[in-house]
Amino acid sequence: MISELLNNLEPWHWLSLGLLLLGAEALGASGFLLGTAIAAFLLAIINALFAELSWQTQIVLFALSALGFSIAYWKYFKEFNNRSDHGPLNQRAASLIGRELVVEHDLSGGHGRIQIGDTFWKVTFEGQINKGSRIKVVDADSMCLQITTIN
């Protein structure tokens, strides 16, 4: 039965495989199946144009194109997909980087706490920061902010 199916591969078989792989990709494969799905669509086109190709040739072309498309995806498009317009949406501390504030009390000793909104944040800094000084959040590590004074 399998040899009969392989000997009678038609474009819609490859098209079905491509759609199945795209569906699996949509369930959360993180780009792993995208190159393979594109290879299946390519084989559907090749099979439609060159119906006399043997199943062995089709399988080899599918494997090579799946490998090529997968490498191309990881090399050129993975970073593109990782970019976000929302920035560090769920990273509250990271979302404060660049924010400028006025200190409401003196800070000394390199460590302290400041209130931003309704939350008190641990802060690290160099030197001493006097009440009323303008500061800027320059880095964040977990729930601790690194601040510096602004002149």
Image: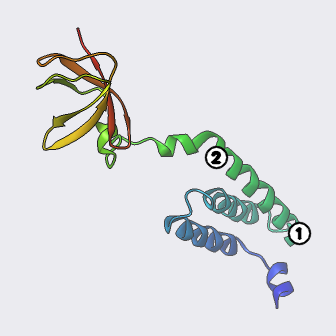
Q: How is the image coloured?
A: rainbow
Query: Quick check: can you spot residue 46?
Result: yes
Camera-side residue: 136 or 77?
136
Query: Quick check: can you spot residue 96?
Result: no
Residue 86, position in %: x, y? Answer: 32, 43
Label for residue 32? none
Camera-side residue: 146 or 82?
146
Quadrant for residue 102, please give it: top left
Residue placed farthest to the top in the image?
A: 151
Q: Disc 2 marks which residue?
A: 74
Name the N-terminal-most of marks 2 and 1.
1
Instruction: Give the left or right position of residue 82, taking residue 117 as reference.
Output: right
User: In percent of the image, x 73 and y 57: which residue is there?
Assistant: 66
Residue 18, position in %: x, y? Answer: 62, 67
- Distance (Cα) linking label 2 and label 1: 27 Å
Instruction: Give the left or right position of residue 141, taking residue 116 as reference.
Output: right
Residue 61, position in %: x, y? Answer: 81, 59
* Figure quadrant of the N terminus: bottom right
* Figure quadrant of the C terminus: top left
Label for residue 56? 1
Residue 24, position in %: x, y? Answer: 56, 70
